[in-house]
Amino acid sequence: MKAMVIIPTYNERDNIEAVASSILALGDDFHVTIVDDNSPDGTGELADRLAERCPRVHVLHRPQKQGLGTAYLAGFKYALQQEADYIFEMDADFSHNPESLPEFLGLMESYDIVIGSRYANGLAVVNWPMRRLFVSLVANQYARWITGLSLHDCTSGFKCFKREVLRNIDLTKVHANGYAFQVEMNFRAQRLGYKVGEVPIIFYERHSGQSKMSIRIAREACWQLFKMRINSLVRPLQFARCPTPISTIHDEKWLDLTNNETNVFLIESTANTSGTRHQHAPTGRSRTSRARVS
């Protein structure tokens, strides 16, 4: 059994080593994939050093900040290529407790997706300001109304997928890139008939650094969900089972930065990134190779 935890990062230098170590301590079945968006604080370089020390740490470098959803999609494709059986989403800032991961796995015999729910047993958030709690509760109510999902926590970013779920969701059709990404993935899984379960968690405000949530982000997420629901009605085939095996999808290039001795890659985005510069420069004799996404 191989479980891979995908952790998107942007300026998480103060947290990433501790959270990765906590996950790896759970056993040899757990791997960590860090997807770093060229963090100015050096998170990517620190992640590389972790990968040098431990083969169960994998690092994907992206040339610029490109959003939460695309970071997870890159991590999903990489995890599938690495033959992971279970694929987790998790924050880097200890808002999600790594010690909960085995509990998720214990429920995967009964469900195809398990979501860590902040609201399954009332309110289970610690040190949140009232404004943020209000935004989260309203966003969840709105998501349930728009999508018909019967979940307590539609927007949770702490979840586990069986491999087959991500192979059959057409990841090339997933468009939400912010916090609406979580709702879209739940919605697409439900449309394909997958069973979604919830496990109660306690959500802790981040140990250090700044939250990326804002009213503007929440407003954008609401608009994205509205567009998604309309598309599901007028273009239902966009939400159908993936018609093409994931092994044939090559919308990103994976460049090996480390002579294949550690799991560190640079993603060359197909988007126009002129004017941006990736700050991480590989040292030594790096052999560049294309890694297939399967």
Image (spheres, helix red, strand yellow):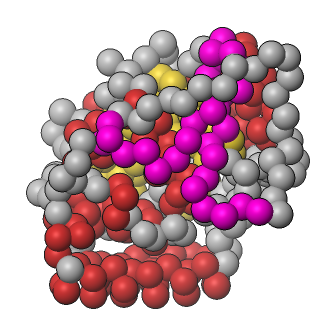
The part of the image, by quadrant, that contains residue 33 is top right
Give above or below for 261 relative to 289.
above
| Of 68 and 123, the residue lying toward us | 68
Is residue 104 within the magenta segment?
no
Q: Position of residue 286 (x, y in %)?
A: 75, 20
Q: How many marks?
A: 0
- Specify whether 8 is left or right of 190: right
Per the image, is 251 magenta? yes
Q: Does any portion of residue 101 appear in the rendered image?
A: no
Front position in the image: 136 or 90: 90
Residue at 18% over, 33% down: 109
Residue 140 sits in which quadrant? bottom left
Picture coordinates of residue 209 (x, y %)?
A: 80, 55
Q: Nearer the viewer, residue 203 or 228?
A: 228
> How far across and down, in percent of the image, does residue 64 sit?
73, 56
Task: Tell me if residue 168 can be seen.
Answer: yes
Q: Residue at x 37, y 58 (%)?
A: 172
Q: Quadrant of the N terminus?
A: top left
**For residue 257, side relative to residue 139 (left or right):** right
Name the quadrant of the C terminus. top left
Seen as rendered, the residue at the extreme left is 193
Q: Is residue 259 above or below residue 90?
A: above
Foreground residue, 56 or 286?
Answer: 286
Identified at 42% across, 69% down, the residue is: 175
Q: Horizontally, is 244 left or right of 205 in the view?
A: left
Q: Against 181, is 11 above or below?
A: above
The region drawn magenta spans: 246-274
In the rendered image, residue 88, in percent from the top left (x then y), is placed at 43, 40
